Image (tube, rainbow, N blue to C red):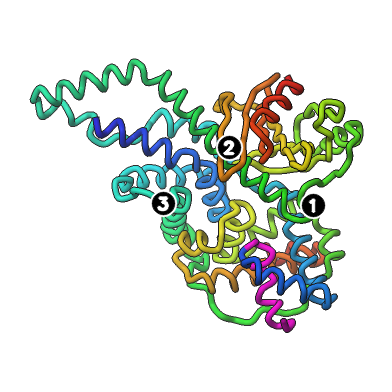
Amino acid sequence: MPDAQERERFEECVLPHLDAAFNLARWLLRDRSNAEDATQDALLRAFRSFASFRAGDARAWLLQIVRNCCYTWLKGNRPHDDLSEIADDDMPSDAPSPEALAIASHDGARIVRALEALPLHFREILVLRELEGCSYKEIAAITSRPIGTVMSALARARRQLRETLSEPRQKENSRVL
Amino acid sequence: MSCELAAIHLHAYLDGELDAAGAANFEQHLRACPECSSALAAEQSLRETLSRAQLYERAPGRLRNHIRKNRPHSSVAEAPKSATWQWLAVAAVLVLAALLGRELVGLFHARSERSVLALAAVDAHLRSLQPGHLTDVPSSDQHTVKPWFDGKVDFAPTVRDFAADGFPLIGGRLDVLAGRTAAALVYGRRKHVVNVFVMESSNASAPAGAGELHGYHWLCWQKDGFTYIAVSDAAPEDLLQLRDLFL
């Protein structure tokens, strides 16, 4: 009974990564309810193309599908979001001191806002690295980027997040709004 | 190594992506360079901030239920259309499977949950062995370690020192296993370190079991609504002995 076997294999390989799928969708879409829809959509697509997945990293494979679903959703629903590729523009250089960061770090809601305020491409790499614990190689596979781009984007994402977190509260609010 | 090169390597070092020689070179540069050291400290502080904020969001229960109940299926419905006896046999087997299904699927989920947990626990054990990662609260005093977890995990793990039984308490640490917050209790066993991860049992909690991964032994058990998983390179008998102390 190939179908039942296939389904079992799917449940064994893919369902353990449901949390990872939802977490990525939640941070890409910045909305839990849309993230639920996107995760469901991604699981369905994953099942349909499961035959082509034989071995390897099921989490990276699923997250790649989740990411595609989220990008499709963003294109349709939030066309103003910047979906373009990572540009090589310069970032301001002076990193805030660890002390400055320590002040902001007690406020969990503020950290959520700061992460959500990051540009999409920075946010996804940071979420994959810091929350999901993906290796550079996995992030490169999930986001279809060269490892070098992942590394430089990660450095810039961290710098930008640190800056947002160490900005005075008012300035940060006006930026997010 | 120059500061420019160190700045390029800093993130790879932080993320454990440098090979041993690269990491040694970087550390050598750090010892001589306060600026790069403080840059690294800033990155580590950011990482701690993110990890303390507990930003990981697990799939809500209703999404999980929805996906399990409405499992996508492809050819089950179409199968009887080609009414050869082979297909009827397949359908009969499917009916049988459906009858057994609930039990089997439950067992299946529980088992895969356990293998995910074991892998996560062994990974966390390996991480904890990196310099400076073993404990957040280094103390052999259970009355110091237990209250340290207050407010950091939303349950109160049992913390006891088993020094008299050959498992001295080394300390405690906050950890995350497969997206779930865990209290990690660190014990010594002769020259070995044992991590005991404690987390609240969920519906899909891992059944008791033991195994070996990457040369490390793990042992999983349940008690009083908690899931415990112990990991160490000590002998499996040592883990069993430690479990019995917890039970």
* SS category of the residue bearing label 1: loop
Camera-side residue of A49 and B132: B132
Q: Quadrant of the N terminus of chain A?
A: top left
Which mark, residue A159? none
Q: Amino acid at mark 2?
A: Ala
Earlier-in-chain disc, 3 versus 1: 3
User: How many neighbours does mark 1 have within 10 angstroms: few (below 14), some (14-19), or many (20 or more)?
Assistant: few
Residue behind mark 2: B118
Does any portion of residue B157 appear in the rendered image? yes
**Mark 3 or mark 1, which is nearer to you?**
3
Whether B195 is drawn above or below A151: the answer is: above
Q: Main secondary structure of the magenta part?
A: helix
Q: Tags 3 and 1 in contact by the CB under 8 Å rule?
A: no
C-alpha separation, residue under disc 3 versus residue under disc 1: 39 Å
Q: Do the residues indicated by labels 2 and 3 lie within the same chain of the protein?
A: no
Instruction: Tell me if B44 is positioned left or right of B118 in this view.
Output: right
Residue at 77% x, 48% y: name it.
Answer: B134
Q: Is residue B5 magenta?
A: yes
Q: Do the residues indicated by labels 2 and 1 lie within the same chain of the protein?
A: no
C-alpha separation, residue under disc 2 versus residue under disc 1: 33 Å
User: How many neighbours does mark 3 have within 10 angstroms: few (below 14), some (14-19), or many (20 or more)?
Assistant: few
Which mark, residue A56? 3
Span shown in magenta: B1-16
**Mark 2 or mark 1, which is nearer to you?**
2
Which x, y percent locates residue B220?
62, 29
Instruction: Tell me if A150 is positioned left or right of A162 in this view.
Output: left
Which mark, residue A107? 1
Mark 3 — on which chain does it sit? A
Residue at 37% x, 49% y: name it.
Answer: A55
* SS category of the residue bearing label 2: helix
Q: Is residue B153 magenta?
A: no
